[in-house]
Amino acid sequence: MRFIVARFVVTLRLPDFFDEDFISLIPTHRAHISDLIEQTIIETYAISADRTKGWVTINAASAAAVQKLVEKFPLFRFLAGVEIDELFVFDSASARFPQISLN
């Protein structure tokens, strides 16, 4: 039986104020995210310029699995909201074959 993985986009609402506890966890959080990117569990990770929202594209079997994964983020307890949506189409330049150079 083939294991089917779906792709989800998670919208994170960041807190209005970043206190010392939040700031102190950023390096641990980034290391955790980097590990998940290396494992291709996370495809993309982005934070808005105004630092109010973040978007994470995650490969998982279900929305429940995504929720469990997000709950393990070091900064999870500070998040003001989490929204999980399963994607039907996901396309990006990084997911395509590199362009061939004839040089």
Image (cartoon, rainbow, N blue to C red):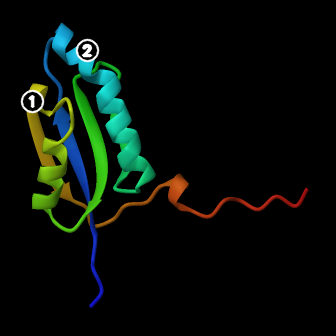
Mark 1 and mark 2 residues within 8 Å of each other at the beta carbon: no
Q: Amino acid at mark 1?
A: Arg
User: Circle 1 — which element?
Assistant: helix
Residue 102 vertical placement versus 21 (above, below): below
Q: Position of residue 93 (x, y in %)?
A: 54, 54
Dot placed on the residue nearer the N-terminal end, 1 or 2: 2
Quarter of the image where the C terminus is located:
bottom right
Q: Residue at x 39, y 45 (%)?
A: 35
**Can see residue 4?**
yes
Using the rendered view, name the quadrant where residue 1 is placed: bottom left
Q: Name the side, left or right, on which 22 lies relative to 27.
A: left
Q: Residue at the far bottom: name it.
A: 1
Q: Position of residue 5 (x, y in %)?
A: 28, 71
What amino acid is at disc 2?
Ile
Residue shown at 19% from the left, 17% from the top: 22
Left or right of residue 20: residue 47: right
Labels in figure, total: 2
Crowdedness near tag 2: few (<14), some (14–19) or many (≥20) residues, C-alpha within 10 Å: few
State the mark number for residue 23.
2
Vertically, is 68 above or below 47?
A: below
Q: Is residue 18 visible?
A: no
> Residues under labels 1 and 2: Cα distance?
13 Å
Residue 9 numbered tag: none
**Which residue is tagged 1?**
77
Left or right: where 53 falls relative to 77 = right
**In the rendered image, the vertical position of residue 12 relative to residue 24, given as above or below:** below
Where residue 8 appears, as percent x and y from the top left, is: 24, 57
Residue name at image x 29 percent, y 18 percent: 50
Residue 14: percent from left, percent from top: 17, 25
Q: Secondary structure at mark 2?
A: helix
